[in-house]
Amino acid sequence: MALHKGGRAGAARKRGYAVNPFYGEADPVAGMAVEPPRLRLPDGPMAPHTAYQFVRDELMLDGNARLNLATFVTTWMEPQAAALMAECRDKNMIDKDEYPRTAELEQRCVTMLADLWHAPDPASAIGCSTTGSSEACMLAGLALKRRWALAHADRYPHGGARPNLVMGANVQVCWEKFCNFWEVEARQVPMEGERFHLDPQAAAALCDVDTIGVVTVLGSTFDGSYEPVADVCAALDALQERTGLDVPVHVDGASGAMIAPFLDEDLVWDFRLPRVTSINTSGHKYGLVYPGVGWALWRSHEALPEELVFRVNYLGGDMPTFALNFSRPGAQVAAQYYTFLRLGREGFRAVQQNARDVACTLSEGIGAMGDFRLLTRGDELPVFAFTTAGGVDSYDVFDVSRRLRERGWLVPAYSFPPNREDLSVLRVVCRNGFSLDLAEHFLEDLRSLLPELRRQHGPLGRPESVATAFHH
Ligand SMILES: Cc1ncc(COP(=O)(O)O)c(C=O)c1O
């Protein structure tokens, strides 16, 4: 949620009607000229269709989701899924006694994911739905922190120790939030040279007795690359042999945990690695559901301390829950189950392969233009990052992002974290619904901008107030 600071009060009154005269029923007394207040509750009600029209008109100015190459989040579902979600919109996920079937669908989704991610015993897997990966990461981080605290209760009988979590500098902001909110030191392995994600040896070197875990990302939000989860586990195995430290691994599979099982079956990154204790994914990214659902799973009951699980009986029943919030819509969970049934493994494979094919074709086309250097190619996550090629000095990635926006495309430009702050990139996320046809249009638009960009006398500078539609 953006932290809003209040609106622009007293916006200048213009000549003419502030309101479309057709919406004349806004106020039966003052008639069609009256605009409802924007920053305080109106004194009285208005007709539903008028209110609807006002809100709809404002929302019309939002971007076109199909041209948004910045977001990972699902922007298209089938009408049947939309109908199902509309039918479930009044169901509250927490109310498991009132809506036992929704709770059952949640449990089935957890079991299916546990099977997909090779949990030792999927039938007794433990996990939950969340609002997205951020909440799932908070829960996984909390479980790591509590396990560490329980294991070290003798060393720190009065508290006082500062736990730490090891990760790459490329982690998504949710991990910085976790560390900030729950007072854990974030130990970040910086990028070096052409290495843009976590290095296994460097990760192991940062671990000590107060390390609650290592976070590995599949794949990186910055460039779509997979982190080497198995190598990180191997480095931690070696650390344990040398020092006795037993450091668990969490895999942030916000996107990749719904790509790798279908397209990279031989890649061992999940519960097949004994050191991997928990995994999260965003149902609303490559899980192909509209925004509002994520998943957190633990390899076994031991990985999730029982004392974090709450049982409340005020809604009837006594269902255990692990969540940051209480009430939450059930529709997304129903939609996730629908998507699982609808696609099955083969369907998911086809959809994800298509996204990867589009990403690879697009990156190849961009690479062939000569003005750009590809950092990744979209052959892991269907996501790739590119920057301007050596010798291109009349414009930079921020200019490209700005110019593409004029054609309706949202392609974020941003600088990398330490130690590659000198490197700024553009990133393209290919999602279901971004077809090869649209990709061709994108290539054509980018190509047609280049002559003008090349004629610039230098980059126009990184916009300070104008966001390029992106922030990690
Ligand atoms: C690797 C990674 N982790 C966590 C998140 C946060 O996910 P969500 O938007 O589902 O909260 C993202 C979002 O892009 C991500 O890429």
Image: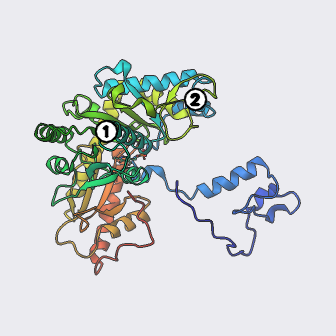
Does residue 32 lie above or below 130 as drawn? below
Quadrant housing residue 348: top left
Q: Is residue 134 left or right of residue 416?
A: right
Determine crowd level at label 1: few under 14, some 14-19, many 20+ residues with C-alpha closer than 10 A. Answer: few
Q: Check the image and report above or below for 251 versus 471.
A: above
Tell me residue 382's x, y (percent): 29, 45
> Looking at mark 2, is its residue's CB closer than 8 Å to ligand 1?
no
x and y percentages locating residue 132 in the rendered image: 45, 42
Q: Secondary structure at mark 2?
A: loop
Which residue appears at 39% of the width and 41% of the height?
142
Q: Is residue 139 visible?
A: yes
Q: Earlier in the sequence, mark 1 or mark 2?
A: 1
Q: Is residue 222 in view from this perspective?
A: no
Foreground mark, 1 or 2? 1
- Residue topped by disc 1: 154
- What's the mark number on residue 324? none
Amino acid type for the residue under numbered disc 1? Asp
**In x, y percent, where is residue 311?**
53, 28
What is the secondary structure assignment of the residue under circle 1? loop
Label disc, if present, on residue 312 of the rendered structure: 2
Mark 2: which amino acid?
Answer: Val
Q: Residue at x 40, y 54 (%)?
A: 180
How far across and how far down the image is residue 357, in percent?
Answer: 27, 42
Residue at 24%, 54% in the rendered image: 365
Residue nearest the observer in this picture, 13 or 434: 13
